[in-house]
Amino acid sequence: MLPPVETDEEWDTVVPDETIMRPGAQDLCGRLGFGDAPLTRFADGSQPVYAVGDELVLKLFPGSAAKDGVAEGRVLSHVQGRLPVPTPQVHDFGAYENGWQYVLMSRLRGENLAHAWPHVPQNHRERLVTEIGETLATLHALSPDPLADVLGPGDWGAFLDRQTTRAVEQQRARGLSPAWLDQIPDFLASVPLPRSPHGSLLHTEVMQQHFMVDPDGWRLTGLFDFEPAMIGDRAYDFVGVGLFVTRGDRDLLARLSRAYGHTFAPPELLAYTLLHVYSNLPWYMRELGTTAEAKLPALAEAWFGTT
């Protein structure tokens, strides 16, 4: 029912078009035994995702992202019931047709933390970041070995080399000004990063947007979106923490780090920010603010400092 999607052009044609996507999702739900459940497509997300009735979620991955579907199904199965915060329970995952993959999972309860954050009182923010720190510590303590066949990058040192080689051009493509671009090579050369770290299971996008919270008491009710998971240096996960959880708030980052059990140096985290697969420094600057006169070391302190 769903056509092949292997190129950006096919993605742009197929994925946004509900006259194509919905019949395929309905057909797959029928095969899985949920053909009578109403489907409601979520507006957010990099992949097409549907609520299946009130209890389930169907996430679809076209052929161009099929490996992400396999990774999400495997990682969710691996972490299920092992973290302090609930994660979606996998009901089924696998291949559909024409290269598509799917994950059918339970629906998390609560409100998206990014939407709720402006209304969260300060004392509850402090407890929430403590819970996030504890959750990350537990995630990073899990053995990633059963997932080594589906998660990259494999050789962490080679990954750092690839990302370093493309770092300036990646930010140039995002619209970063020459004054900032010129600083990147020397800054990266000045920050030693481990080339063979202890391999941790990384979420890679630890953001308010990927947590759910119960406004009645402000407790975390879920962590989701494991499709970009990797195995590598645990500090890499703190890029999203500093940018999209604590958002430059030193006290909150210090509290989260204490709950995690380790504090990372700001230059290390900014280096990983520049080397992150989805790095977009101009966007982060718009979100968190900066000054035209600032330098990268000062930016590291502003975003990732705890003292």
Image (cartoon, helix red, strand yellow):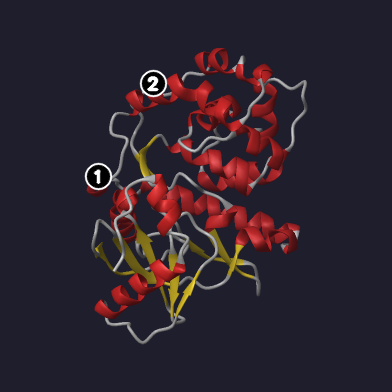
Q: Position of residue 298 (x, y in %)?
A: 70, 23
Kindly indicate whether the residue at mark 1 contacts the one at mark 2 (C-beta within 8 angstroms): no
| Disc marking residue 132 | none
Left or right side of 30 for 12: right
Q: Earlier in the sequence, mark 2 or mark 1?
A: 1
- Residue 199 lies in quadrant: top left
Q: What residue is rendered at 65% in x and 46% in y? A: 246
Spatial CA distance of label 2 from label 1 is: 23 Å
Q: Helix, strand, or loop for circle 1?
A: helix
Residue 306, visible in the rendered structure: no
Q: Which mark is residue 161?
A: 2
Identify the image quadrant of residue 56: bottom left
Q: Residue furthest bottom?
A: 36
Residue 301 visible in the snapshot: yes
**Mark 2 belongs to which amino acid?**
Asp
Return the x and y of residue 2 as percentages of the image width and height.
31, 64
Q: Residues within 10 Å of mark 1 (few under 14, many from 20)?
A: few
Identify which residue, 160 or 38, lies in the foreground.
38
- For the C terminus, which image quadrant? top right
Q: Is residue 12 left or right of residue 186?
A: left
SS category of the residue bearing label 2: helix
Quarter of the image where one finds residue 58: bottom left
Q: Is residue 141 left or right of residue 119?
A: left
- The answer to whether 251 is drawn above or below residue 281 in the figure is below
